[in-house]
Image (spheres, rainbow, N blue to C red):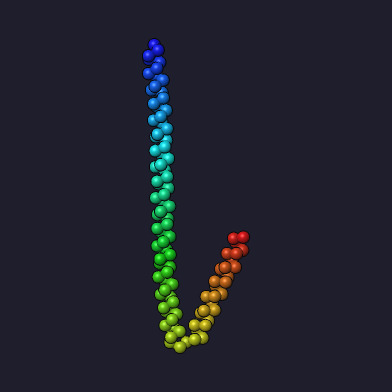
Amino acid sequence: MSEAYERERQNTSRLDELSSKVSALRGVTVDIYDQARSQDVIDSSNEVFSNFSTSLKTSAGHLGRMAGAGNRVQVFKLAAMLVGAVVVLWWIWRLLMP
């Protein structure tokens, strides 16, 4: 009887060890999944910023050609609107983010 009790105790002990290892493995799996999702978000953000950079360079090139064409009044008006838009966005951002 004592031998059966000892085996049962060992089985219970090993089952507890196995359970803790499975829990640790599950935690690692969840961490890997979270890292993969955040990496996907980072890659998406990099793509958005890359597209924005390309668009900004194209717009700057168009503005440069327009300035080179001699239409200085239009360039000044456009520059004033851009500066105004940046100031308004900065002001809104300052109001929303104390």
Residue 69 in the figure: left or right of residue 81: left
Residue lying farthest bottom?
70
From the viewer's perspective, is residue 88 above or below residue 26? below
Return the x and y of residue 15 as percentages of the image width and height.
39, 27
Instruction: Classify 65 as above or below 92.
Output: below
Q: How many marks?
A: 0
Residue 64, position as x, y percentages in the image: 43, 81
Across and down, in percent, residue 98 comes to: 62, 60
Which image quadrant is residue 44 in?
A: bottom left
Can you say whether 36 is above or below 4 in the image? Answer: below
Image point 42% across, 43% down: which residue? 30
* Residue closest to the eye, 8 or 56: 8
Residue shown at 43% from the left, 87% from the top: 69
Give the residue at x 42% y 57%: 42
Residue 50 in which image quadrant: bottom left
Quadrant of the snapshot with the N terminus: top left
Residue 54 x, y percent position in the rendering? 40, 70
For the point 41% across and 23% down, the residue is: 12
Q: Residue furthest top?
A: 1
